[in-house]
Image: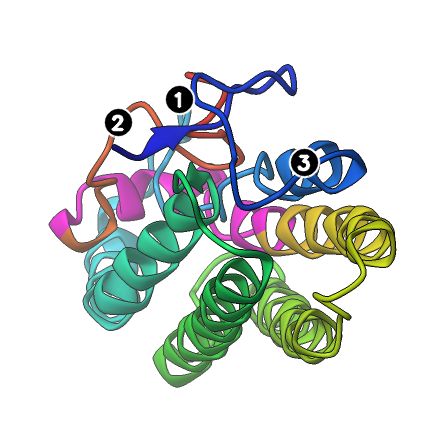
Amino acid sequence: MDERVLADGRSQAAEPGLRGPARGATRRLLTLPLLGVLLATGAAACSSDDNSAALGNWAKQVCDGVRGPVAQSQDAMKDTGVVKAGEAPADLQKRLAADLGNLSTANQQIAAAINKAGAPKVDNGAGVQQDAVTELNQAAQGYQDVQKKVAALPTDDQAKFADGLKSIGDQVQQFSQLATGALAKVQTGDLGNAIAKQPGCKSQDTGTAAGGSPAAGE
């Protein structure tokens, strides 16, 4: 039976496939923050009547475009938080590489949706849009680079495998935080108010909103 890794580094189930130092490093990689999703997280300023319709249309286009990629990113990140009893290092390597590839693709697609929607009609709307798109694409490239590193780890040497996972885990956390910060740019003020009204931007799991960790139970 699969068990999720706890945020403090302990697990609820043994990992027969990984022994010794590889286990701790693997857990560290598997307790990364969930990719932020487009979900308003606080009170937002009210937009004027003249601008509310335009912002609503912008938010609808963005949210309809990101629904699939957000679900894909949630599934991929949740999968990295699962420990499969008896899973061999080579199988874990293959699974994590696939998850990272899915995270890269999801970030690219979210960036494309925000870019396609155009600049929102708020102060410095073009700057907000482009900053978010740029950072999401940077996160996507980062996930892709880490995916290649995971695929290249030596699974026949568990000490090296553990060291590799430790380094990779730190990098993935940085890219997750970059993506979360990028999405926060379009979740504030009038944009946050407009996005909060869109079903396409509702989190499928209210316990895993932007920056949260499914393993941490936040």
The amino acid marked with disc number 1 is Ala
Find disc 3 in the rendering and name its residue: 23
Find disc 2 in the rendering and name its residue: 206
Q: Could you tell me which secondary element the residue under label 3 belongs to?
A: helix
Q: Does residue 118 sit above or below 82 in this rendering?
A: below
The amino acid marked with disc number 2 is Thr
Q: Main secondary structure of the magenta part?
A: helix
The image quarter in which residue 147 lies: bottom right
Q: Residues within 10 Å of mark 1 (few under 14, many from 20)?
A: few
Mark 1 near mark 3, Cβ–Cβ under 8 Å? no
Q: Residue at x 55, y 70 (%)?
A: 97
Q: How crowded is mark 2: few (under 14 residues within 10 Å), some or many (20 or more)?
A: few
**Closer to us: mark 2 or mark 1?**
2
Picture coordinates of residue 8, whole percent (x, y): 64, 14
Badge number at residue 43: 1
User: Was residue 126 drawn as part of the magenta stretch in this picture?
Assistant: no
Q: Quadrant of the N terminus?
A: top left
Mark 1 or 3 closer to N-term?
3
Left/right placement of residue 81 relative to residue 178 reads left
